[in-house]
Amino acid sequence: MLAVVVAACAPHARSGPASPPPPIQASPPVLDPPEAQAARELLVARITAKQPISPRVAGALREVPRHLFVDAPLERAYRDRPLPIGWGQTISQPLIVALMSDLLDLHGPERVLEIGTGSGYQAAVLARLAAHVDSIEIIPALADAARSRLRALGYANVDVRTGDGYLGWPERAPFDRILLTAAPPSVPGPLLEQLAEGGVLVAPVGPEGEQRLVRWRKHDGALVEDIGRRVVFVPMVPGSE
Ligand code: SAH
């Protein structure tokens, strides 16, 4: 397989039938001016020229105002680059957000667990593709900021928790999809346990410098690994819970 190094993220239990993604209002024009929308169009065109992605994922990238998740001028917010979000962390390169969202193969009714909320941008993209997103962030200040931001932007189907992603969110398991946006040395056991039958987990896995994107599908309790491309992510830090 072609190995491409891409800069990415440099460093309740519910029952009953799942519902399709809830409508999320567009951000008001004052927050999301036409030039930001135009910049997103261009960014999506650049991404799709490099990486085929589904129309649903492209649509979500067109809708989520990345500039409201980062402390950077509009023009920089829509470059295909990772950006600092404080606390030594970064928001992933949009191409990687697109690729990982696409690998999750979301159709609408899924319940998703994200590890590494960061700015909340990836969670917002997932919220437009799935029914519900639970996201765990280990740095309390980032978790609090992301929670407030997502609420202010109308993402009612995202819950953010401060905690250690290695443990997952057992009270809300099983999850149809799990996405890690920080890299563990290997896929944590609790997360595999919390993946629903037929579910998909996407993660950057491995030590720094040797991370690869992997996708697991849980079939009859068996997990199939699908090695993807080489990536560069911040390591997933062990928590103290
Ligand atoms: N998805 C984010 C970017 C992720 S950067 C976005 O869209 O902005 C990786 C994040 O993982 C960082 O915020 C980091 O603090 C968090 N992280 C690292 N180790 C973690 C752990 N063990 N549990 C939960 N979050 C963790």
Image: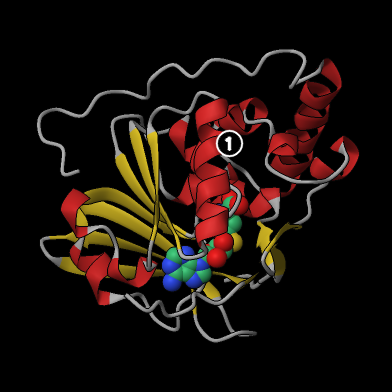
Residue drawn at the location 77% of the way across and 22% of the way down: 37
Residue 76 can be seen, yes or no? yes
Q: Is residue 67 left or right of residue 15?
A: right
Above or below: residue 87 compared with residue 126:
below
Residue 228, position as x, y percentages in the image: 51, 67
Residue bearing mark 1: 149
Q: Is residue 232 found left or right of 235 in the rendered image? A: right
Quadrant in the picture for the C terminus: bottom left
Q: Residue at x 36, y 75 (%)?
A: 187
> 196 above or below 146?
below
> On the image, which quarter does residue 60 sit in?
top right
Identified at 56% across, 56% down, the residue is 141
Q: Is residue 150 left or right of residue 104?
A: right
* Residue at left offset 57%, top offset 46%: 145
Question: Closer to the camera, 115 or 195?
Answer: 115
- Residue 96: % across, % down: 63, 54
Image location of residue 215, percent across then percent down: 40, 63
Instruction: Decide: is 136 above or below 232.
Output: above
Near-viewer residue (123 or 44): 123
How many marks the image carries: the answer is 1
Give the position of the N terminus as an image quadrant.
bottom right
In the rendered structure, the answer to whether residue 8 lies left or right of residue 188 reads right
Judging from the image, the colouring scheme is secondary structure
Q: Quadrant of residue 238?
A: bottom left
Q: Residues within 10 Å of mark 1 (few under 14, many from 20)?
A: some
Label 1 residue SS: helix
